[in-house]
Each structure stands twice: as structure tokens, then as C-alpha cells.
Image (tube, rainbow, N blue to C red):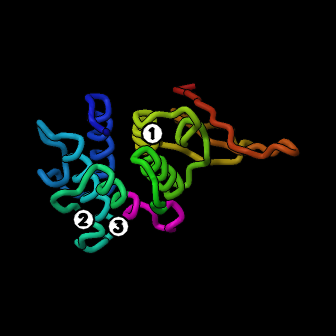
Amino acid sequence: MVGGNFATEQLHEILEKFREESGLPNTPRTACRCGDSANDLLRKILFVVRTDAGLPDSPSTEWRPGDTEWGVSIKILGALDETGDEGCRCGDRLFDLWRKILNAVRLQLGIPDVPEFSFRPGDSLNDLLRKLRALLDADIIITPCDDMNDWGGLTGPIVCFEDWGLFAGPIVEFEDWGNV
């Protein structure tokens, strides 16, 4: 279900970002190796996020022989969802689990609900994986728009908030001030 070259490449990038953030070394158990399948990458992502979260090696938190992509995804969600708000519900599909994983990571990083980093109706599983990778890649500064003045050499997404009466929400601006 997760298979395919595009999805596997996305999972590879997601694994690398989680591994870098956790500070775990590049070992066969924590990093992509030539020939890894989507299921191998999911298993490694689970190991990295479980280890980073300090969860014990138990059947409910670590990969076990016979675990499906769906089962491993449930365990990844459990390791990432600190609040328990995004837990698995009876009947959740693999897509639903990855939508919840994306949301749990976005909330942990304190990123607002903006289209670039959040689920939107019509998104595919590959879209969710791409957004998760983008979220893990993002170097985002969250600030009130009133504070935007001299940014020096800053490039990248800037998320600022405006209050326009009935509408109060995030505005994502991509600025490249370069060496101005």
C-alpha cells in the first residue's frame, strides 16, 4: 500500500530527518540502506521515533515479525502523539494513520494549520508523505507580522499572524531578503 518509488523515496527522506533530529548514529538499524523496502523504512522510522521518545521495547511500541505497514504505522503514531489526541480509531485506514502522524508532528513543532504542512481534502498518501518531509525540512520562524522588519540574510518560510477582525489566522510568506 505504501510501496512505489515515490513513496519509498519520501519514507527514506523522512527517516533521515527523524534520525538527524534524534541524534542517533547512522547504523543499519537507524538509516536507509540500499534495497530497503517501504516496510523496512517504516520499521526503521518506528525504531528511531520510539528510541527518541524514550519508549520501551515492547510489543506495542516496537516492530515485531509479522507486523504489517498498517500495524507499524499505528506504532509510529503512538510514539509521536504525545498528547494522545491523534490515537488510532477502529476502522482507520493507512491513509488516516499518516494523516494523524502528519498532524502530530506539526503540533509538536508548533506549526500552524497551513496548507503547506497540513492535511487538505484531496490529498493522497504521497501528498501526506511529501508534506511530512517538508515539515521536517522546514526552518520556520513564527512571529506576529507587526514584528517583520530587518531580517538580514534570512531566507525561508516565515509564518506570521494577522488579526483582521473576524478573521484571525496564519499567513505564510516566503521571503528572500538576501543581502539587501
Q: Residue 82 at x, y = what percent?
A: 46, 67
The structure residue drawn at horizontal position 42% and vertical position 48%, both measured from the top left corner, is 93
Residue 103 badge: none
Looking at the image, which is closer to me, 134 or 124? 124
Q: Check the image and report above or below for 56 versus 41.
A: below
Q: Is residue 154 left or right of residue 32?
A: right
Indicate which label's residue lies in the foreground, 3 or 2. Answer: 2
Residue 66 location in percent, x, y? 18, 57
Amino acid type assigned to the residue bearing label 1 in the image: Leu
Q: Quadrant of the N terminus?
A: top left
Local secondary structure at mark 2: loop
Is residue 79 in the magenta section?
A: yes
- Over which residues does the magenta segment extend? 77-86
What SS does tag 3 mark? Answer: helix
Among numbered discs 3 and 1, the one appearing first in the sequence: 3
Asked if marks 3 and 2 touch (Cβ < 8 Å), the reply is no
Task: Find disc 1 in the rendering and name its residue.
Answer: 128
Q: Which residue is mark 2?
A: 62
In the rendered picture of this protein, how many numbered marks are placed on residues?
Answer: 3
Q: Main secondary structure of the magenta part?
A: loop
The amino acid type of the residue labelled 2 equals: Glu
Mark 3 nearby-residue class (10 Å; few <14, some 14–19, many ≥20): some
Task: Give the alpha-carbon distance from disc 3 to disc 1, as whole Å.
Answer: 22 Å
Residue 5 magenta: no
The residue to which callout 3 is attached is 53
